[in-house]
Amino acid sequence: MAGPTKKPRKPTEPQSDDKSMSDESESGTYQGQQEVQATFEGRNPEGQDFHGIKQLLLQLFLKAHIDLSQMSDMLISQTGIGSVLKQSYDDDEDEDDNMDLSEDSNVFGITSVINLTSHRETPCVQQFFTLLEDLTKQHANKGVQDNITKVLQSKKLGFLINERFVNIPAKISAAMLNSLLDEMERIKKKNSSYDFDYLIIICKTCKSKGGNDDEEIYSNDEEELFTKAADATFDFCVEKETDVGLGGKWLSEDKQMIPYRRVVIFKGSKFKDLVSQISILVQ
């Protein structure tokens, strides 16, 4: 684990969990709702965020054969790009207490990008490419396979990461993605490899048992816009893998939802407009 200590960014406005936290009975089955008020801020990733970042990557990749420890270190060591979402505290609290709370606080989300082209020889990136190629062969039709094969031969590829706890409202994504966009605009003036030809994102979705595609839920609501802008996309089911955040426990009258992952590939030139659309969507 590595990463210099960096100053926190400007805190976001207080957020109310509009999806609400689950209130569970002794059996762990969802019974009601309670609203939780919290204030979050985006911070540059630091060494103490390693385990929180790795946990967020784990909920995305589940049992895939990727060295998530190495990928977490990559996200921390990147200079001037990417943010972790952490809870902020009142300014009038004791400064020492705030420092202790800040260093021990959980990572609630991460928004960043990995330059796949620059790190192509890094083992976890090679594993990512292998996973993507294997999933494409297994789950995509011939036309999508051909399209993705051409994309993977592009000179500049980025892996967009937009992960957070399932109950964090979508409104927070606008601030995180706008920050990432600004960082990418700055860094590509010095390093043209960040002027990505294509961006790849893996979205968490779930569908009702029975295969009705009309009944589909995105874990991160805003990511539906990425799907609409996709140049190539396909789904794969992860029902047999551990996924508490989307699997959950359901009351008998609820429809059981099956967790999926959706690979979405879109042109890097679309990213700025997509972030603008997301900002409007979550207002």
Image (tube, rainbow, N blue to C red):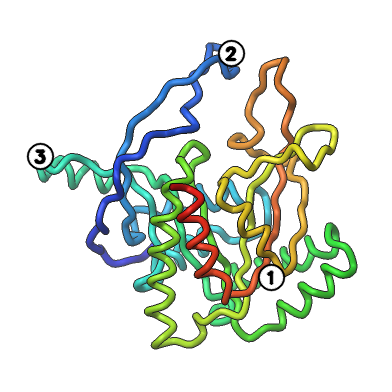
Q: Nearer the viewer, mark 1 or mark 3?
A: 3
Query: Does the image show residue 121?
Result: no
In this rendering, is residue 151 above or below 282? Answer: below
**Gap between marks 2 and 3 measured at Cα:** 40 Å
**Residue denoted by label 3:** 92
User: Alpha-carbon neighbours of circle 1 within 10 Å: few (<14), some, or many (≥20)?
Assistant: some
Secondary structure under the numbered disc 1 in the rendered image:
helix
Counting residues from the start of the chain, the first of labels 2 and 1 encountered is 2
**Marking on residue 149:** none
**Residue denoted by label 2:** 27
Query: Residue 74: image x %, image y %?
Result: 46, 68
**Marking on residue 129:** 1
Counting residues from the start of the chain, the first of labels 2 and 3 encountered is 2
**Gap between marks 2 and 1 measured at Cα:** 41 Å
Please give left or right for residue 51 compared with residue 156 in the image: left
Q: Amino acid at mark 3?
A: Asp
